[in-house]
Structure formats: structure tokens, C-alpha cells
Amino acid sequence: MEFMATKGIEYLMAITYLVLLIPFWRLIAREPEGRLAQGLARVLAPAQAMRSWFAMPDGLHFHRGHTWAAAEGDGVFRVGLDDFAQRLVGRADAVDLPRKGTLLEAGAPGLKLGFDGHAVKVLSPLGGEVVATNPAVVRDASVLCEDPYGEGWLMKVRVPRPASALSNLLSGRAARAWMDDAAESLSTLIGPKLGPVLQDGGVPVSGFARELSPDGWQHIAEELLLTS
């Protein structure tokens, strides 16, 4: 009987807990601006912000080295840096593009960005022949930061087997999920420097690698661009 009495008390405590839990959650739902809700919002805000840190237009195909490709027809693709890459390194002093007729290998270095005597390699998302380069970014590298998916394109590449080449790139939801993972990894890397490295709008400043580590920024860039 003593055993049954003990069990009865335990059951009563469990039921009481559940009864009290229901109005607690109802209170949160009714008062989204309350202190508790505000506290939860502060905890969730960084995770939600990560998902909008970097722009990703529809219709593009992304390489994990943070370059993109857009089909222009007849096996020709326009290639550029994505928003993550341009924010990572910031404004370059010079852009070293391959010459017309150069044969590129997918996933291998295809161009270089120059910063104060340092060079950062960037991977080509596609393998093929360079058929054109963008003189605008060679004249003024700031175009890369201002319009990475438009006027800041880098080169055009003719690919022999487009369908096969695109199978190794990411697009749509897969690309968005990959970029979200990159943003989350970045937030971990930033750590206590999150505040100084974010703009007022809540996105990383241009050239955040140099803000993170003035001396070792090139290594950070190479790690994130997969060229280390």
C-alpha cells in the first residue's frame, strides 16, 4: 500500500506539472511582447539573421568556392564572385583575369584578386575556354562589391558539356541551404567580434576577413574560398 501511495503522489505531481505548463505557454502566446518573449527573440535573432546575411539571386548556379555561373546560351556561362566572397575580402586593388582563350579547369584557381601586395586565388566554377572578360572590373575593382551579380561579373566561359558541368554546382534550395551553413560557420568564426564586424543593417562589413584578423586575413580568405 505504501508503494501505491508513493506512486500516486508521483502521478499527482506529473499531472500538476502538465496542468501548470499549459497556461504558461498560453501566456507566452498571448503576450509576444512580454519580457520572456523578448528574451527568446534576442536568443533567436542571430540565427534568423544568418539566413539573410548574403544575397543569392534566383537562376544562378553556385560553386562551394563562392563563385557563380549564369547560362547565356550556346554553352557560354557568365562567371562571377558571390556576395559572400566580395564581403569576405572587400574591395580589391586589382583583378587578375585569365586571357581570352585560356582553358580553365572546374574547381581549380581561375583568377586572382590583389590586396596591398597580397594575392587571393579564386576557383572557377566551370571548366572550359574563356571567351570574354569584363574590362569594367579590371579598370575599377569596386564594381565587384557594388554589383557582384550584375555589372561585377568577371568572365565568360564556353563549356563543352553544360549539363554535366552544372551537375557539380548548387542552385535553388540546395544553394540557399549551403549559404546558410556558410553563414552559420562564419558566425562561429566571428565569435566575440560579431558586433564590430556587422554593419548597422546586421550583415557583415565589406572585407570582414581583414576586420577579423588584420595579420592573418589572407589565411581566413583562403580557407573559406577553398584555395588553402
Image: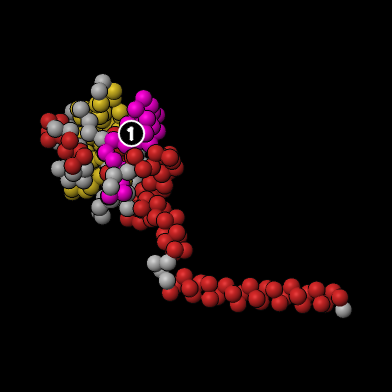
Q: Dot 1 surroundings within 10 Å: few (below 14), some, or many (20 or more)?
A: some
Look at label 1 and name its amino acid. Answer: Glu
Query: Eyeballing the image, is 71 above or below 129?
Result: below
Q: Is residue 121 left or right of residue 135?
A: right
Q: Is residue 209 magenta?
A: yes
Nearest to the observer: residue 112 or residue 163: 112
Which one is nearer the viewer's eye here, 188 or 222? 188
Tell me residue 89's x, y (percent).
29, 34
Q: Nearer the viewer, residue 80 or 40?
A: 40
Q: Nearer the viewer, residue 109 or 196?
A: 196
Q: Quadrant of the N terminus?
A: bottom right
Q: Which residues are magenta?
A: 201-228
Q: Residue furthest top?
A: 117
| Quadrant of residue 172 within the rendered picture | bottom left
Q: Residue at x 39, y 67 (%)?
A: 33
Identify the image quadrant of the C terminus.
Answer: top left
Q: Which residue is mark 1?
A: 211
Q: Is residue 133 visible?
A: no
Looking at the picture, the colour scheme in use is: secondary structure
Please say whether residue 187 is visible from this viewpoint. yes
Residue 53 in the image: above or below residue 25: above
- Asked whether, in this view, residue 20 is left or right of residue 202, the answer is right
Which residue is at a point 81% across and 77% down the rendered structure image?
A: 5
**Residue plotted at (32% across, 53% down):** 52
In the structure shown, which secondary structural element does the residue marked by tag 1 occupy?
Answer: helix
- Residue 108 in the image: state x and y as whole percent: 33, 32
In percent of the image, x 63 and y 72: which residue is there? 17
Q: Is 207 included in the stretch rendered in magenta? A: yes
Q: Is residue 4 left or right of residue 215?
A: right
Instruction: Report which quarter residue 43 is drawn in.
Output: bottom left
The percent position of residue 140, horizontal first and vertical second, equals 14, 32
Return the x and y of residue 161 as percentages of the image width and height. Answer: 28, 44
